[in-house]
Image (cartoon, coloured by chain):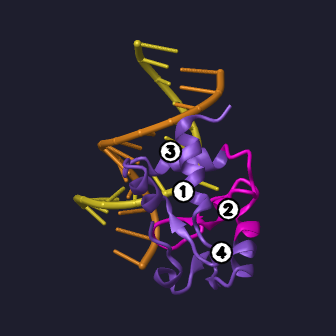
Chain colours: A purple, B yellow, C orange
Amino acid sequence: MPTDFQKKVWQKIKKIPKGKVSTYKELAFALKKRKAYQAIGQAAKKNPYWPAVPCHRIVKSNGEIGGFASGSRVKKKLLEKEGIRFKNDKIINFNQFLYKL
DNA sequence: GTCGTGACTAGCC
DNA sequence: CGGCTAGCCACGA
Protein backbone atom coordinates (compact mmCIF):
# COMPACT_ATOMS: atom_id res chain seq x y z
CA MET A 1 0.00 0.00 0.00
CA PRO A 2 1.72 3.16 -1.17
CA THR A 3 1.83 6.14 1.10
CA ASP A 4 0.93 9.65 0.05
CA PHE A 5 4.53 10.62 0.19
CA GLN A 6 5.53 7.88 -2.20
CA LYS A 7 2.72 8.69 -4.57
CA LYS A 8 3.85 12.28 -4.69
CA VAL A 9 7.38 11.24 -5.37
CA TRP A 10 6.43 8.91 -8.17
CA GLN A 11 4.16 11.56 -9.61
CA LYS A 12 7.09 13.90 -9.85
CA ILE A 13 9.30 11.27 -11.35
CA LYS A 14 6.77 10.51 -14.03
CA LYS A 15 6.94 14.12 -15.13
CA ILE A 16 10.54 13.80 -16.11
CA PRO A 17 10.69 13.79 -19.93
CA LYS A 18 12.57 11.15 -21.82
CA GLY A 19 16.20 11.90 -22.34
CA LYS A 20 16.39 13.98 -19.18
CA VAL A 21 17.29 13.24 -15.60
CA SER A 22 16.70 14.77 -12.22
CA THR A 23 18.32 14.64 -8.83
CA TYR A 24 17.04 13.49 -5.49
CA LYS A 25 17.60 16.96 -4.24
CA GLU A 26 15.47 18.63 -6.90
CA LEU A 27 12.73 16.12 -6.32
CA ALA A 28 12.75 16.71 -2.61
CA PHE A 29 12.67 20.43 -3.23
CA ALA A 30 9.63 20.01 -5.46
CA LEU A 31 7.90 18.19 -2.64
CA LYS A 32 8.55 21.11 -0.31
CA LYS A 33 10.82 18.93 1.74
CA ARG A 34 14.24 19.70 0.41
CA LYS A 35 15.86 17.66 3.11
CA ALA A 36 13.92 14.52 2.31
CA TYR A 37 16.24 13.47 -0.50
CA GLN A 38 16.94 10.24 1.25
CA ALA A 39 13.27 9.59 1.74
CA ILE A 40 12.96 10.00 -2.03
CA GLY A 41 15.36 7.14 -2.35
CA GLN A 42 13.20 5.10 -0.02
CA ALA A 43 10.17 5.73 -2.19
CA ALA A 44 12.03 4.86 -5.35
CA LYS A 45 13.30 1.67 -3.84
CA LYS A 46 9.83 0.65 -2.81
CA ASN A 47 8.40 1.72 -6.12
CA PRO A 48 6.12 -1.13 -7.29
CA TYR A 49 5.46 0.55 -10.62
CA TRP A 50 8.90 0.08 -12.04
CA PRO A 51 9.66 0.65 -14.86
CA ALA A 52 6.37 2.46 -15.35
CA VAL A 53 7.85 5.09 -13.09
CA PRO A 54 11.22 6.01 -14.58
CA CYS A 55 13.10 6.07 -11.34
CA HIS A 56 16.23 5.36 -13.35
CA ARG A 57 16.17 9.02 -14.33
CA ILE A 58 16.95 10.00 -10.80
CA VAL A 59 20.60 10.52 -10.04
CA LYS A 60 22.73 12.00 -7.32
CA SER A 61 23.31 15.73 -7.17
CA ASN A 62 26.93 15.36 -8.22
CA GLY A 63 25.97 13.64 -11.46
CA GLU A 64 26.70 10.09 -10.41
CA ILE A 65 24.18 7.36 -10.99
CA GLY A 66 23.89 6.40 -7.38
CA GLY A 67 22.36 3.07 -6.56
CA PHE A 68 19.62 1.09 -8.16
CA ALA A 69 17.50 -1.79 -6.90
CA SER A 70 17.84 -3.70 -10.16
CA GLY A 71 21.50 -2.90 -10.52
CA SER A 72 23.20 0.36 -11.45
CA ARG A 73 24.40 -1.30 -14.65
CA VAL A 74 20.85 -1.57 -15.95
CA LYS A 75 20.08 1.96 -14.92
CA LYS A 76 23.04 3.22 -16.84
CA LYS A 77 22.03 1.27 -19.87
CA LEU A 78 18.51 2.66 -19.83
CA LEU A 79 19.76 6.20 -19.55
CA GLU A 80 22.25 5.69 -22.35
CA LYS A 81 19.41 4.41 -24.43
CA GLU A 82 17.71 7.75 -23.93
CA GLY A 83 20.74 9.61 -25.17
CA ILE A 84 22.59 10.29 -21.96
CA ARG A 85 26.33 9.71 -22.07
CA PHE A 86 28.31 8.29 -19.20
CA LYS A 87 31.84 8.42 -18.10
CA ASN A 88 32.17 5.39 -15.90
CA ASP A 89 29.34 6.01 -13.45
CA LYS A 90 29.09 9.75 -13.93
CA ILE A 91 26.95 11.63 -16.42
CA ILE A 92 28.76 13.71 -19.01
CA ASN A 93 27.33 17.23 -19.39
CA PHE A 94 25.14 16.40 -16.45
CA ASN A 95 23.82 19.92 -16.21
CA GLN A 96 22.68 19.70 -19.80
CA PHE A 97 20.51 16.67 -19.15
CA LEU A 98 19.26 17.85 -15.80
CA TYR A 99 15.54 18.47 -15.76
CA LYS A 100 14.62 21.13 -13.26
CA LEU A 101 11.16 20.75 -11.85
C1' DG B 1 7.14 5.04 20.90
C1' DT B 2 12.09 4.22 19.88
C1' DC B 3 15.92 2.48 16.94
C1' DG B 4 18.28 1.39 12.83
C1' DT B 5 18.56 1.64 7.86
C1' DG B 6 18.81 3.79 3.25
C1' DA B 7 18.98 4.47 -4.47
C1' DC B 8 21.38 11.26 -0.13
C1' DT B 9 23.68 15.96 0.68
C1' DA B 10 26.49 19.41 2.66
C1' DG B 11 30.19 20.51 5.53
C1' DC B 12 34.79 19.76 7.51
C1' DC B 13 39.50 17.88 7.66
C1' DC C 1 40.19 15.86 -4.49
C1' DG C 2 39.13 11.96 -1.22
C1' DG C 3 37.37 10.34 3.13
C1' DC C 4 34.53 10.97 7.35
C1' DT C 5 30.65 13.04 10.08
C1' DA C 6 26.34 14.99 10.99
C1' DG C 7 21.73 16.00 9.65
C1' DC C 8 17.22 15.25 7.55
C1' DC C 9 13.01 12.29 6.16
C1' DA C 10 10.14 8.15 5.67
C1' DC C 11 9.60 3.26 6.73
C1' DG C 12 9.84 -1.29 8.89
C1' DA C 13 10.86 -4.00 13.03
Measure the C-alpha gap from mark 4 to mark 3.
24 Å
The disc, 1 or 4, on the residue closer to the chain's N-terminal end is: 1
Of residues A94 and A11, the one nearer the viewer is A11
SS of the residue at dot 1? Answer: helix
Residue A25: which numbered mark, if any? none
Q: Which of marks 4 and 3 is in front?
A: 4
Q: Name the residue under label 4.
A: A18
Q: Which quadrant of the figure contains the N terminus of chain A? A: top right
* A17 in the magenta segment: no
Of residues A15 and A99, the one nearer the viewer is A15
Q: Mark 2 points at which residue?
A: A54
Mark 3 belongs to which subunit? A
Q: Nearer the viewer, mark 2 or mark 1?
A: 1
Q: Check if mark 4's residue and mark 2's residue have beta carbons within 8 Å.
A: yes
In percent of width and height, residue C5 lies at 34, 47
User: Please, what is the three-letter code of the amino acid marked with disc 2?
Assistant: Pro
Disc 4 residue crowd, few under 14, some 14–19, many 20+, Cα 10 Å: some
Measure the C-alpha gap from mark 1 to mark 4.
13 Å
Image height of A61 relative to A86, above or below:
above
Q: Residue at x 45, y 67 (%)?
A: A61
Q: Do labels 3 and 1 share a chain?
A: yes
Q: Name the residue under label 1.
A: A12
In percent of width and height, residue B10 lies at 30, 61
Q: Check if mark 4's residue and mark 3's residue have beta carbons within 8 Å.
A: no
Q: Name the residue under label 3.
A: A39
* A53 in the magenta segment: yes
The disc, 3 or 1, on the residue closer to the chain's N-terminal end is: 1
